Amino acid sequence: MMDWEYSDIPCPRCGAVPTKMRDCIEIGCEDGYIDLYDQDPSYYFPGEDALCPSCHGVGVVRWCGECGHEIWLKEIDGE
């Protein structure tokens, strides 16, 4: 069973196409954000969100199957 997909985004390091991607598997990650209240209800209010440390707010994780480089959204957007 394959838990990742191919992506048409080229690797910014080596230029390989296709690259690979999968949904973020961080516990509590919903579309790139984690509800902090679910993590620690004694400290946070309902609805307080933080960027997911695994996918950095993207909701998916991308990497190059050739060189192993992790591809972040800022690299894709050219920032």
Image (cartoon, rainbow, N blue to C red):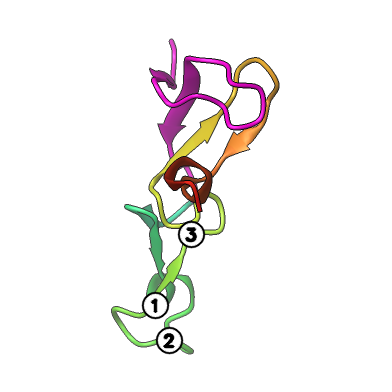
Q: Which mark is residue 51?
A: none
From the image, tell me which residue sits under label 1.
Answer: 37
Which-is-in-front pick, marks 3 and 1? Answer: 3
Q: Secondary structure at mark 1?
A: helix
Q: Secondary structure at mark 3?
A: loop
| Left or right of 6, for residue 63 | right
Residue 22, x across and y down, in percent = 43, 30
Disc 3 versus disc 1: distance between alpha carbons?
14 Å
Across and down, in percent, residue 5 comes to: 40, 19
- The segment highlighted magenta reads 1-26
- Tell me which numbered mark, 3 or 2, is placed earlier along the sequence: 2
Q: Quadrant of residue 64?
A: top right
Along the line of sight, the residue nearer the viewer: 13 or 62: 13
Residue kind at label 1, given as amino acid type: Tyr
Q: CA distance from mark 3 to mark 2?
A: 16 Å
The answer to whether residue 27 is above or below residue 9 is below
Q: Nearer the viewer, residue 63 or 25?
A: 63
Q: Are marks 1 and 2 in contact (CB under 8 Å)?
A: yes
Q: Which residue is mark 3?
A: 52
Q: Is residue 51 magenta?
A: no
Q: Residue at x 49, y 22 (%)?
A: 20
For label 2, the residue is 44
Badge 2: few (under 14), some or many (20 or more) residues near its Cα, within 10 Å? Answer: some
Q: Earlier in the sequence, mark 3 or mark 1?
A: 1
Rate crowding at label 1 as few (under 14), some (14 to 19) or many (20 or more) other CA atoms within 10 Å. some
Query: Looking at this rendering, what residue extends furthest in the top direction?
Result: 1
**What kind of element bears circle 2?**
loop
The image shows residue 71, relative to residue 10, as above or below, that is below
- Residue 37 appears at what percent x and percent y? 39, 77
